Amino acid sequence: MENRHGSAYDRGSADSYYRRGRKPHYYVGDTYTSEIVTEERMTADEIAAYHKGFDENESWGNYKDWG
């Protein structure tokens, strides 16, 4: 599983951290500056990596403090 910045795991973790909800995706390169790959174009392994990143962050309770 790849966990570089922009990877499916990284994006799942970030979506949880910012409380954005689940929407599997990743970036081919750096986040926001490269092509985005959405769920309908992701492999089963990439989708699983996204959910793993999301679920792990949820279990840690590591969320952005907007206060």
Image: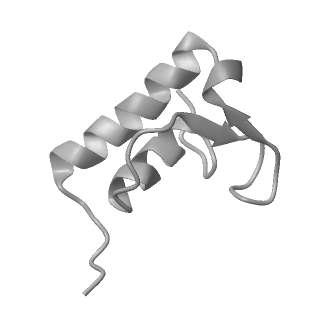
Is 30 rendered above or below residue 47? below
Residue 22, position as x, y percentages in the image: 41, 39
Image side of residue 45 versus residue 20, left or right = right
Q: Nearer the viewer, residue 6 or 1?
A: 6
Image side of residue 52 versus residue 55, left or right = right
Residue 45, position as x, y percentages in the image: 54, 15
Q: Residue furthest top?
A: 44
Is 36 rendered above or below residue 34? above
Q: Residue at x 61, y 52 (%)?
A: 5
Specify the quadrant that holds the C terminus.
bottom left
Is 13 rendered above or below residue 32? above
Image side of residue 47 versus residue 4, left or right = left
Is 2 rendered above or below residue 4? above
Q: Residue at x 55, y 12 (%)?
A: 44
Residue 56, position as x, y percentages in the image: 28, 40
Residue 16, position as x, y percentages in the image: 35, 51
Image quadrant assignment for residue 62: bottom left
